[in-house]
Image: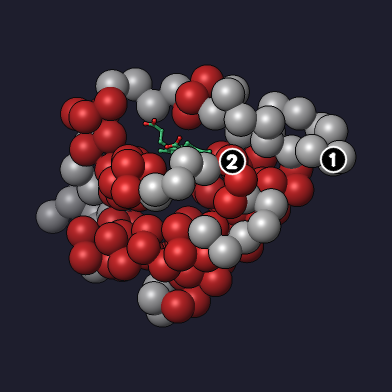
Amino acid sequence: DKPQTVYEAIGGETTIARLVDAFYARVARDTLLRPLFPPSFDEVRLRQFWFLSQLFGGPRLYTEHRGQPMLRMRHLHFPITPAHARAWLACMREAMEEVQLPVPAREAMLQRLTMTAFHMVNTDDESI
Ligand code: HEM
């Protein structure tokens, strides 16, 4: 048998979908993050569902629909400071609590997402 992926360990598609919903509900209420996003979260929510499914060992949905992730490049339109990365991660941590992700998987995922979030930082101007 193949070793279990994080995706499988947390409950696959259903859990990722609940996580992404809980996450963007928080982003929508976050005064620092909200202004960066368009009025509707529908598209980014779906793309994030594809991305996180793929990142944690599920089906390669993001690449199927969007090609190479190149996430840093895709974020260059938005001025992202270290404070944005921290706010993004706080929303994710709370969303993980809300959907009650199993703690070992949660820690592994947060570690990976912390690296990714700070990789998106493209300005250190904290006045933005
Ligand atoms: C797209 C903000 C971190 C994954 C976006 C969009 C914004 C944004 C504004 C575009 C929304 C739209 O116009 O529809 C941020 C901010 C971050 C951050 C402020 C703070 C560090 C991350 C991280 C990941 C991620 C850590 C991955 C785990 C994505 C994906 C998309 C996206 C997959 C859709 C890209 C596409 O296919 O067009 N993000 N993001 N973001 N973000 Fe982030």
The part of the image, by quadrant, that contains residue 115 is: top right
Residue 24 spot, x, y in % from top left: 45, 58
Is residue 95 left or right of 3 when viewed as pictured?
right
Position above or below: 58 against 8: above
Q: CA distance from mark 2 to mark 1?
A: 15 Å
Viewport quadrant of the N terminus: bottom left
Q: Which of the two marks, 2 or 1, is nearer to us in this view?
A: 2
Residue type marked 1: Glu
Disc 2 CB within 8 Å of nearest ligand 1 atom? yes
- Rate crowding at label 1 as few (under 14), some (14 to 19) or many (20 or more) other CA atoms within 10 Å: few
Element carrying mark 1: loop
Position above or below: 89 against 62: below
Quick one: 43 or 83, which is closer to the camera? 43
Is residue 25 left or right of 56 when viewed as pictured?
right
Q: Which residue is mark 2?
A: 36
Residue drawn at the location 79% of the way across and 38% of the way down: 128
Residue drawn at the location 39% of the way across and 76% of the way down: 99
Q: Which residue is mark 1?
A: 126
Q: Looking at the image, how many numbered discs can be counted on the residues?
A: 2
Marks 2,1: beta carbons within 8 A: no
Residue 83 spot, x, y in % from top left: 75, 48
Residue drawn at the location 36% of the way across and 63% of the way down: 21
